[in-house]
Amino acid sequence: MKVRRVVASSANKGGIGKTETQKRNYDLLPQHGRRVVAWDLDWATGSFAAYDSGIKTFDMRGKRSGASWLDDCYDDDIDDVLIDLPGGRLDDLLNTFGEGDAAALVKAVRDSGREFVAVVPIGVSVAETVTAQVPLHAFAGTDARIVVLKNGRFGDPSDFIIYDGIVNDGERRYGATRELAGRVGAETVYLPGLAPRLSAQIDAERLRLIDATRERGLALLGRLGVARVQMHLAAVTEAWRGSSLDLDGDVPPRKDAK
């Protein structure tokens, strides 16, 4: 089922992978024929806006009037509206539609004919896992599609034991966040990691990932670097396939909360 979407990345703390996720969506969706517009809601210091001049900005707490990301939801020429939220600022977005009202936010998006996809990245530590419970609770009971994203920058898929849980001496420990994700009907997807040194070099050179696979990337990263970025983006494409982040917009049937 191909759909039009709002894809919003949110976390209760910074540095977990909200912007990493949206950079990949911003670069890869057009490669799959999707028409994309992107918003950084941290207008003053947002790192997503710095990624490309075409990314729009908005201050959720400001008094500025004019166009917002919701206006783009009603544009039939756009398939995917990407939103990058500042860390810990989910309440500011929800309060735009009423005091902490996630249902009203999701309804506003659905009324425009789009699916709302809430992306919640996590790491491997307790703090990077437990904070995911805030958006999971916020969107529970709404029509949102929720994707918990294991950020491969922090480890391999099996390293997320705080999220998945582990059996030790016959006793199951951890896993409370995954249990909550199951209850609210969330999906779990793994974001493949990119070598830290290569990622740092790409950032230092102010390259978009997609440009790192092209002529400028070849000049700055060499053939091996370009090949590694190409393999990374191919792995992300495969990881997204069949999920609510599917790059072709071909999403699975909606999961029911338990």
Image (cartoon, helix red, strand yellow):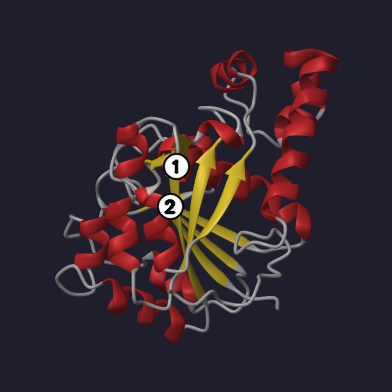
For the residues marked 1 and 2, what is the alpha-carbon distance in whole angstroms? 8 Å
Residue at (61% x, 50% y) in the render: 25
Which mark, residue 9? Answer: none
Apparent side of residue 131 relative to residue 91 in the rendered image (left or right): right
Disc 2 marks which amino acid?
A: Arg
Q: Name the residue under label 2.
A: 178
> Mark 2: which secondary structure?
helix
Q: Position of residue 36 (x, y in %)?
A: 61, 60
Q: Mark 1 points at which residue?
A: 165
Residue at (59% x, 79% y) in the render: 76
Residue at (35% x, 36% y) in the render: 128
Q: Where is residue 6 in the image (x, y as percent from the top left)?
A: 49, 66
Residue 255, by quadrant, is bottom right
Question: Looking at this view, is 96 or 1 the one in front?
Answer: 1
- Labels 1 and 2 touching (C-beta < 8 A): yes
Residue 35, by quadrant, is bottom right
Of the residues tagged 1 and 2, which is closer to the observer? 1
Residue 33's place in the image compared with 213, above or below, is below
> Mark 1: which secondary structure?
loop
Disc 1 marks which amino acid?
A: Gly
Can I make out residue 40 in this image? no
Quarter of the image with the N terminus is: bottom right
Apparent side of residue 153 relative to residue 120 in the rendered image (left or right): right
Can I make out residue 240 in this image? yes
